[in-house]
Amino acid sequence: RAHSATPSFAELHMKNVVLGQPGFNEHTPYVFGKTVVKATGKKKSKDIFFTMSTENQLLNAYRQVSTSQAAFWEVDTTYRLTTEGLATMPIGTVDLSQTYYHIAHGICLHEGTKDHVIALQNVKDEVEAVVARYAASGRRV
């Protein structure tokens, strides 16, 4: 399947590109963390992996931990959400009442333990970065 638009999408939504844009806010999606986007000349991608979310969704992880409840994370992978056949990995948390709060999405070409570990590490690092940014600016989490 063709994945030619995916590298362009990921590059246009990188954190360092969108963070300074006018209109950026806590609901603006961006790509962060370890990102691999290698396209070949035949409109097929060799390897694709990126994690994306919004600041507000990332803060769901912090809010869950800060409520003094046990933090449960849910990660699943499905190939049914993209027309290109890429795996999408929704990452979220649930509270004790079984309410789901979305945190991020991992997008990958080849699902495996390595991709899950990278996605979760990306989310952890970005949650810490967003919380630190909010704390430094005096914004309420």
Image (tube, grey):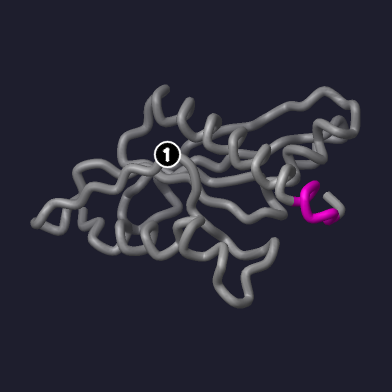
Task: Examine the rendered structure and indicate whether residue 115 appears above or below residue 84.
Answer: above
The outermost residue toward the left is 42
Residue at image location 68% in from the left, 47% down from the top? 130
Q: Which residues are magenta?
A: 134-139
Q: Give amino acid for label 1.
A: Lys
The outermost residue toward the front is 136
Left or right, 122 with reference to 65:
left
Location of residue 116 in the rendering, given as x and y in whole percent from the top left corner:
47, 29
Residue at image location 49% in from the left, 35% down from the top? 119
Q: What secondary structure is found at the residue carrying circle 1?
A: strand
Q: Which residue is mark 1?
A: 34
Task: Please rate how many residues cluster around mark 1, counting C-alpha atoms within 10 Å: few if below 14, some from 14 to 19, many from 20.
Answer: few
Asked whether residue 115 is drawn in magenta, I would say no
The outermost residue toward the bottom is 22
Left or right, 140 with reference to 89:
right
Q: Is residue 98 visible?
A: yes
Task: Examine the rendered structure and indicate whether residue 55 appears above or below residue 21.
Answer: above
Residue at image location 82% in from the left, 40% down from the top? 63
Location of residue 90 in the rendering, given as x and y in whole percent from the top left corner:
56, 42
Magenta stretch mostly in which secondary structure?
A: helix
Marks counted in the figure total 1
Left or right, 78 with reference to 101:
left
Residue 65: name its quadrant: top right
Residue 54: name its quadrant: bottom right
Location of residue 29 in the rendering, given as x and y in whole percent from the top left corner:
57, 60
The front one of 43 and 17 is 17
Residue at image location 73% in from the left, 27% down from the top? 72
Task: Examine the rendered structure and indicate whether residue 22 appears above or below residue 139.
Answer: below
Left or right, 29 with reference to 132:
left
Location of residue 107 in the rendering, given as x and y in whole percent from the top left corner:
42, 45
